[in-house]
Image (tube, helix red, strand yellow):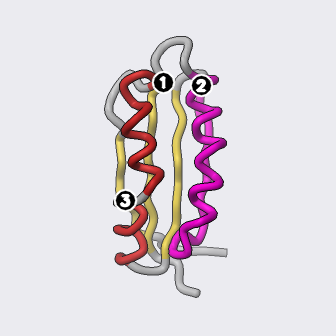
Amino acid sequence: MTVDRGLLALLEAKPGKGDELAAFLEQGRALAAEEAGTVTWYAFRLSDTTYGIFDTFENEEDRQAHLNGRIPAALGQVAPDLLAADPDIRTTDIIAVK
């Protein structure tokens, strides 16, 4: 397995919506588990309003499949209610893995 690609999504919750965003992210784990091409999927909290998702992939096709999959679609549906701004989604190159 050669994991060399990732996605980092930073999410800023509207005031008072952090817990709801956290619950949404917890539910996202089940969707990520269904994606054969997503090697790892992490949801995390940086502060009361700042959350994120980090995923890893073995190839560009799997990363693109994820970007076009159910998790981004679900995020798009709840974003107007939960997010203070559009998600900051960045592609990453994995340099080293343990």
Regarding mark 1 in the picture, which secondary structure is present there?
loop
Q: Residues within 10 Å of mark 3 (few under 14, many from 20)?
A: some
Residue 29, image x, y percentages: 64, 52
Q: Is residue 26 left or right of residue 37?
A: right
> Looking at the picture, how far across and down is residue 54, in whole percent?
53, 54
Q: Residue furthest top?
A: 16
Does residue 9 belong to the magenta stretch? no
| Mark-to-mark CA distance, 3 and 2 | 22 Å
Q: Amino acid at mark 1?
A: Ala
Disc 1: CA contacts within 10 A as few (<14), some (14-19) or many (>=20): many
Q: Earlier in the sequence, mark 3 or mark 2?
A: 2
Check the image and report above or below for 15 versus 80: above
**Along the viewing direction, whichever of 46 and 86 lies nearer the viewer:** 86
Q: Are marks 2 and 1 in contact (CB under 8 Å)?
A: yes
Classify the position of the C terminus by image quarter: bottom right
Query: Label 3 belongs to which residue?
Result: 67
Going 42% across and 74% down the picture, which residue do you hit? Answer: 62
Q: Amino acid at mark 3?
A: Leu
Q: Which residue is mark 1?
A: 13
For this view, does 88 lie left or right of residue 22? left
Q: Secondary structure at mark 2?
A: helix
Q: Of the numbered discs in the image, which one, if any, rests on residue 20?
A: 2
Q: Amino acid at mark 2?
A: Glu
How many numbered marks, from 0 up? Answer: 3
**Residue 31 sits in quarter:** bottom right
Residues in magenta?
A: 18-47
Residue at the location (60% across, 74% down)?
97
Q: Is residue 55 above or below residue 65?
A: above
Task: From the image, state whether disc 2 or disc 1 is nearer to you.
Answer: 2
